[in-house]
Image: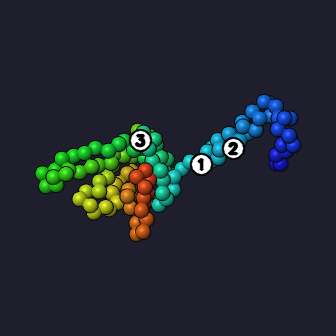
Amino acid sequence: MELVLPLSHRNWTRRSVLGMCVAGLGLPACAAMKDSTAAYGAKVTYAKGTAIHFPDFDLTYLGSRKEPSKVYPRGFTYEDFRVSKGSRSTTVSWTGGTGLVVPCAFKFDGQKYQLMLAFGGPGVKLKNNELIVAKV
């Protein structure tokens, strides 16, 4: 499809400008309608309350919480996620602990997975709003 614009902006009507804007806004909407299932092992952006659809479950970030500790004076910060499919649901809590950042192992419907925040493996640093889920 070729877009033909009038040679002079004086020939542009409000209707033609509006039509171009609507057409331009429609393209991203069409792209968003593609399959929105996240792949295992891929970086995924997350936000509080927004479900990420994986092939076997949905993952929703619930937020972070601080827990005191007798052994570690600063306490621990946990990142809580809900893993669900249909009526089945469980909570997975990831923490960086005392600095040793490792994946959080969890099991859902008999299958083992790993939730990775901060680091997604050797040489893979994740942003604060990125995660990786791996099927083990």
Nearer the camera: disc 2 or disc 1: 2
- Please tell me how crowded label 3 is: few (under 14), some (14-19), or many (20+) other residues with Cα within 10 Å: few
In the depicted structure, whether residue 119 falls above or below residue 17 = below
The residue lying at 29 percent from left, 54 percent from top is 95
Residue 18 lies, in percent from the top left, at 75, 33
Which of the pair 83/8 is nearer the observer? 8
What is the total number of numbered labels drawn onto the structure image? 3
Can residue 112 be seen in this snapshot? no
The residue sitting at the bottom extreme is 122
Secondary structure of residue under mark 2: helix
Which of the pair 43/22 is nearer the observer? 22
- Looking at the rendered structure, the kind of residue marked 1 is Asp
Can residue 47 be seen in this snapshot? yes
Name the residue tied to disc 2: 27
- Of callouts 3 and 2, the N-terminal one: 2
Residue 38 lies, in percent from the top left, at 51, 52
**Whole-number angstrom distance, CA of label 3 to CA of label 2:** 27 Å
**Whole-number angstrom distance, CA of label 2 to CA of label 1:** 15 Å
The residue lying at 33 percent from left, 57 percent from top is 104
Name the residue tied to disc 1: 35
In the depicted structure, whether residue 115 falls above or below residue 47 = below
The residue lying at 86 percent from left, 35 percent from top is 11
The answer to whether marks 2 and 1 mark residues whose Cβ atoms lie closer than 8 Å is no
Name the residue tied to disc 3: 48
- Please tell me how crowded label 1 is: few (under 14), some (14-19), or many (20+) other residues with Cα within 10 Å: few
* Quadrant in the picture for the C terminus: bottom left
- Looking at the rendered structure, the kind of residue marked 3 is Lys
Nearer the camera: disc 3 or disc 1: 3
